[in-house]
Image (tube, rainbow, N blue to C red):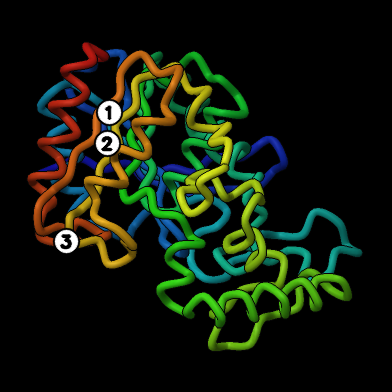
Amino acid sequence: MISVVLAQITTRDRITLDGIVIEPRKKSATALIWIHGLGSNFSHGQSITRELSQTCLKNGIAYFKFNTRGHDVVNRDAPKKKAQTIVNRLRGAGFERFEDCVLDIRAVIHFARKLGYRKVILVGHSTGANKALYYLYKTKDPAVKGLILLGAISDIAAGKKKFGATGLARGIALAEKRARKNSDALMPLPYGIFSAKRFLSMFRQGDSEDVFPYLNPRAAWKELKTIRAPIAVIFGSRDQYLDRPAEKLVEIFRSHALSTKSFSGVIIKGADHGFKGKEKMLSKVVMDWIQQQAVV
C-alpha cells in the first residue's frame, strides 16, 4: 500500500494547482517531479504513477505530480477581478498560455524544496517535455539535477501526421486570421478544442512552444543546446506520433545537446506514446539513469 497525499499549491500569479505527493519513509534529498502532457492531469496515467512512484520509494526518492494550468481540455479558476470575463479565466489545453508553464513548474519545485528536497529530477511527458525543457531554459534552476524528456515529439510534426501538411497550413492560416480579431476565438472542431492563439502556439514554427524543431534543418535549438544538467531522451519505438524512426530522432537530439554534462537516448521497444503496457520497463530505465547520474 502506497501512502498518497493530496496537495494544493499556489503559483506566483495566484493560480491553484492540485496534485499528489508520495514520500518515502527514509528520505533522500531527491524528488522526481512529473509534468503531464496535453490535456492530461495529475490523476491520469495511474499505471505509470504506480510503477514509477514505487520505484522511486524503493530508492528513497519522493514523487510529485501536479496539474499545470493546462490540465484537461478546459478549466478555469476563480476570477481575480469582478470585471474579468469568463473567457479570460479559461485555461486548460485549449486556452493555456504556454509560457506560463514556468510559473507552474516553479511552484511545484518550490513546494518540494519546502518539504526538504534539494535535488529535483524533472520529468516531462509529451507536451510536458516541452514545458520541462522550456522551464529549465528560462530559469537555469540549479535545483534541477536532471532532465528527462519522454515522448518529446514536435507538435508540428504530429499535426502534419494528423491533418496532413496542407490541412495544417490551412489551420494555421485560419488561426492567424481569427487571432487578429479575437485570440480566444475557437477553431473549427475538426482542429480540436483550441483557441486560435493556442493553436498557433502549438503548430506554428518558431513560437515559444516549438522547442523540438526537428522539422526545420536550420533551427537553432536554442533551448536544448543551453541545458547543462544531464539529459535523457526516451521514446517508444511505436510512438504513434513519430514521423521517422526513433533512433534517428534520438541522434538529432544528441547533436543539439551541446552543453549538457551527459546525454542519454533510450528507445523502449514496442512502447507507444503513452508507454502503455511498458510502465515497468519505463520505470526501470528512469531509475537506472538517475542512479547513473549519482543524483540520489
Q: Would you name the residue on which mark 3 appears?
A: 276
Q: Tag 2: residue type? A: Ile
- In-image side of 74 versus 132 (left or right): right
Name the residue beneath numbered marker 1. Answer: 62
**Badge 2 is on which residue?**
22
In this orientation, which residue lies closer to the viewer: 154 or 9? 154
Q: Distance of mark 1 from mark 3, alpha carbons?
A: 23 Å
Q: Which sits earlier in the primary sequence, circle 3 or circle 2?
A: 2
Q: Position of residue 259 (x, y in %)?
A: 45, 17
Residue beneath the point at 60% across and 69% down = 94
Q: Residue at x 62, y 51 (%)?
A: 98
* Tally of numbered tags: 3
Res. 78 image quadrant: bottom right
- Residue under the image location 53 percent in, 19 percent down: 141
Q: CA distance from mark 3 to mark 2?
A: 22 Å
Would you call the spot at circle 1 few (<14 residues within 10 Å), some (14-19), or many (20 or more)? many
Quadrant position of residue 113: top left
Give residue 19's position: percent from left, percent from top. 41, 47
**Element at label 2:** strand
Name the element at disc 1: strand
